[in-house]
Every structure is written in C-alpha cells, then in structure tokens.
Amino acid sequence: MTTRARRGFARFRIAGAVVLALAAAGTGVQVMAAQTDPTAAQGAPPVPSLTWSDCQDGFECANAAVPVDYREPQGRTMTLAVIRKKAADPAQRKGTLFLQPGGPGNSGVDFVRGNYASLPAALRDSFDVFGYDVRGVGRSSAVQCWDDQRYTQAVTQAKGAPGPDAFEPAVRQAADFDQACEDNAGDLLPYVGTEYVARDIDLLRQALGEDQLTYYGRSFGTYIGTVYAALFPERVRALALDGAYDPVHYADRPYAYDRPQYLALDGAMGRFLDWCAADPATCGFGDGDPRAAFEKLKSDLDADPVPTANGGQANGYTLVYRLMFNINEGKVIWPSLGEALRKAQQRDNTSFLLRPPSPASFDFLGPNVVVECVDKDYPSDPALLKRNVTAFAEAAPLLGPAMAYGPPTYDHQHATACAQWTGEHVSRYDGSFGAEGSAPILVLGTTGDPDTPYQDAVALSRELDNASLLTFKAEGHTAFGRSACATDAVTAYLVDLKVPARGTTCADETQPPSSTPKVAPPGTTLGELRNGVSDRLDHLGVLR
C-alpha cells in the first residue's frame, strides 16, 4: 500500500474510532470494531433483494445491488450479475455452493454456466450452484483501461526475446496503462479490491438465505476465499481452496510472491522440453535439442512475425503468451504443444500458439492487472523495481523475459504497472489471514503447478488456523476435475464435511498420450482443441 493510501486508511479508522468512542464512552470492543469493519460506524449495508428470471438451460439470473464503498454502506450502489441452478434433487439439498473462478478477471457467471454439467452428481444434487461476476469484472461494471486497439498494439509490439534495453520502455508502457485506467475507470478503481469482493459475498450469502458459506474457489478464487474466512470465520461452513495463493506474500510481499511464480512457470516449460528431448517421436519438436530450438523460434518470430488469418501478426511474444496459459493443462497436452510448436516453426498460422490475444482476452487482462494493483503493496522504489524485474527475467529464461518486459497483461507482468500505481487502495485487505475459529478449510496444491506454486498451498495451509492440505502430484494448474482422487475428496468435503486425513496425496495425473489427441482426454479441458482459442483460465477439468 502506498504511503498516501496508508494515511487515508489511518484517517478513516481514527475518525471511526472517535465517533464510536464519543457515542459509547470509549469501550474498547467498539473501537476495535471500527478498526476491522468499515461498516461499523454507519451500520450494516442492506442485504440485496434477488429477483430471479429464467436465463436458459435451467439457469436463473438476477442482479444484486451492493455498496460501491463499504465505508458508506448506505451510499451509492453498484450492480452485480448473479446466476444459479437449483439443486437437481431437492430432497438432498444442503444449501448453496458458491463457485469462484480464477483470475482476477474471470466471469463467475460464465464459470457456472460453462462448468455445471461437469460437476460431480453429488454436488449438483446437494446444492444450488451459484456464481457471480465480481465487482469490476464482466457484467458487474467491468473496468477498462486500454481499449482493444491500444492493447492490440501493445501485444503486437512486444517481444518473445526482449533485448537488454527492454526495462525502461516497459516502465513507460506500464505508466501509460495506469493513466488509461485513471482516465477511463477512475471512479471505480479504489473499490475493486478483494476485501470488498469478500464483503459482497457475505451480502450474497445472506440474500440467498444461507447461515454459512459453502465455497469452491480455484486459483485467485482461493485468495478471495481466504479473505472471506479472515473477515467472517464463524460464517464458514466449507471452503475448498484449489491452486492456493500464499496470502501474505501476495498482499504484503509481492516481489516475494512474483519470483516463485516465474520459477514455477519456467520450471513447467522446462519439464515439457525435457520430455520432448526424451521422447522426440511423440513430441515432434526440437530436432534433439528442444531448448535451443525454442529459443531460436522465439527470436525468429520476433524478427519475422507470422501473418494471421484475421490480418494480425503472431510473434515471439504471442508464442510465450499462449504457452503461459496452455501449459496449465498438464501432461495430457504435451503432445499437442509439441505439434503446435512444430507448426509454428513451419510458420503455419493454424498453430494455436500463434493466435494473438483477442478482445475477449483484454476483457480479462485489464481487470486482472487492476485488481492486483489495488490488492498488492508494491514498493514505489524504481531501483527496487528494476532489480527485481531484471532478476526474475534472468532466473526464468524460457518464458520470463517476455513476461517481465511485456505490456501489463497477466500476473507476471504486473510489477511495472503496480509499482507506479497512484490510485487509492481502500478495498485492499490488510488484516491477518488466520481465520481463527473457522470450520475446517480444505487447501489443495499441485506439485508442478505453473501458475500457483505448490509452496503457496503449503504456506496457506499453515497460515490458516484450521486447515487441511491435500497434495496432487502432477503437472498443471489446480486439482479438482483433473484428479479423480482430489475430485472425490473435494466432493466429500463440500457435501458431508469429511476432511481428508493429514498428509493425503493424490497421484493419478493422466499421462501424456502417445500422439496428439483430437478430443479432450480424461482429466483435461484441452480448451484449444475443443473450443478453439481459450483466452481465460476458467474451465474445470472434465473427468471421463
């Protein structure tokens, strides 16, 4: 949090404490309430009234009015788009299951609609399945910084193998992004942080008539769930947090959070290339030295981009960007990645790794940067920024340089924007993460996760007062839907509150097929193969 933002928080909290002290003769309990709950001085915000209407295929949709600023709970409101599908077996219904996708920036409405049919029958029978677009995302007052034209220009000019002088241009470009945010979404920016998202969830819980929260969150959804538990521990029934964030590093030590993420992504890419070297017949890329071939491919595409079918260009950055997301599918996608890299070598623009980020991507990427800039406490020291970004690029040579010096897009490219962020951080959560007194919380970590490193799940399980860690020994991002073992454990926990035994480990990852699959194999979405371009990380695995 910037010094100015901290002072703003301090002024608010001091004022709140004084009001309560004057009203109640200075009782310590009430003063503490003003320090931990921004609504304490002005009363609780109104619970939204949900008017449901049919929105096809058995889903119901509604709008929920929530405060823009929880320091003024009776003030201005904003509208959140929500969706649900009622329990398939009313006789077995236990309540409502909140599903929260990754991101930040993914649509919870689309997440529920797109993944409902893949959920285990026990979840569909036992719960109304519920999701919503969080504030600043999708149908809930989405923030926009750069427009599609400016984003397209930025990713077209980016490099897969940036040169030695890439840092300063990256900083200037990030400053341009920040200014665009202020110009185009300045009124909303201070209020899209995760503390306010968690408070929205508690209002939605009440609107749905639930005494406690039942929740599955993946990737960034784990941080949202962690903040909810920290704020409302007694309101937790069951939280399954899959692909977990280390909340202390994420919020308070962002450079310490970023470095393992660079290493995890590059490690996954390296293990894939090692597999290509060990099984060249199945991989089909590299001619015996896939690492050297990959470095040459990035440089060749930077020097001579491939024209795309829609008149755009695919360069080395395009390649890195697509790999960053698709490597998350785990080992089952490795033959497909090999074929796509070979096509890229041949300048065949049908390779899914040569599809530049699209406007659908930008709808996700803009909020992804903004939310993390509000949530995270990046120091504003430019020398520290340069040391860290340079070190991360050097430590992760396969994909790291493109991420470090590219435009503000996904997690790895936030430091240059967030270290220069001048907006307020009023909705950032800055309390402890222990959630003392909560019901047992289930944390899941995947040992080869390229996106949320396994050590983050270990750290979260230790940070929480009452948590159990389930380990999935596998490549790829998250465990639910990719492992029958993990999926069964999550389902039993959410339905019957059965917590896996300490030290539970699942090791049932689907291994690489012997050739490029044409349909999605068990345990993966293979979104590129099934659905064309997969721009966002909002699909659960499908176990067949």
Image: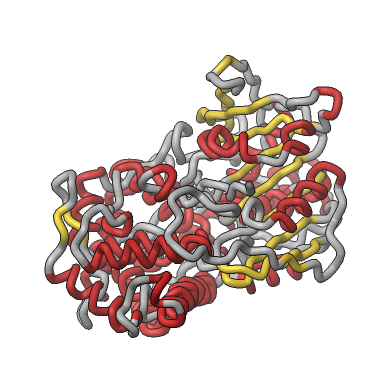
Q: Is residue 367 left or right of residue 445?
A: left
Tell me if 246 is positioned left or right of 6 in this view: right
The quarter of the displayed image where residue 52 is located: top right
Question: Does the image show residue 517?
Answer: yes
Q: Is residue 214 left or right of residue 524?
A: right
State how many labels appear. Answer: 0
**Where does the image place residue 9, in percent across and percent down from the top left?**
56, 55
Please report the residue visible at 58 percent of the width from the left and 66 percent of the height from the top.
511
Residue at position x 28%, y 49% in the image: 180
Q: What's the colour scheme?
A: secondary structure
Height in image: 472 above or below 110?
Answer: below
Residue shown at 41%/55% (left/top)?
A: 369
Q: Residue 528, percent across and down?
A: 40, 50
Q: Residue at x 58, y 50 (%)?
A: 541
Which of the pair 278/359 is nearer the observer?
Answer: 278
Please say whether residue 172 is visible from this viewpoint: no
Q: Is residue 38 above or below residue 469?
A: above
Camera-nearest residue between 246 and 300: 300
Q: Is residue 436 left or right of residue 276?
A: right
> Where residue 483 appears, x then y in whole percent?
67, 57
Give residue 238's position: percent from left, percent from top.
79, 47
Q: Quadrant of residue 120?
A: top right
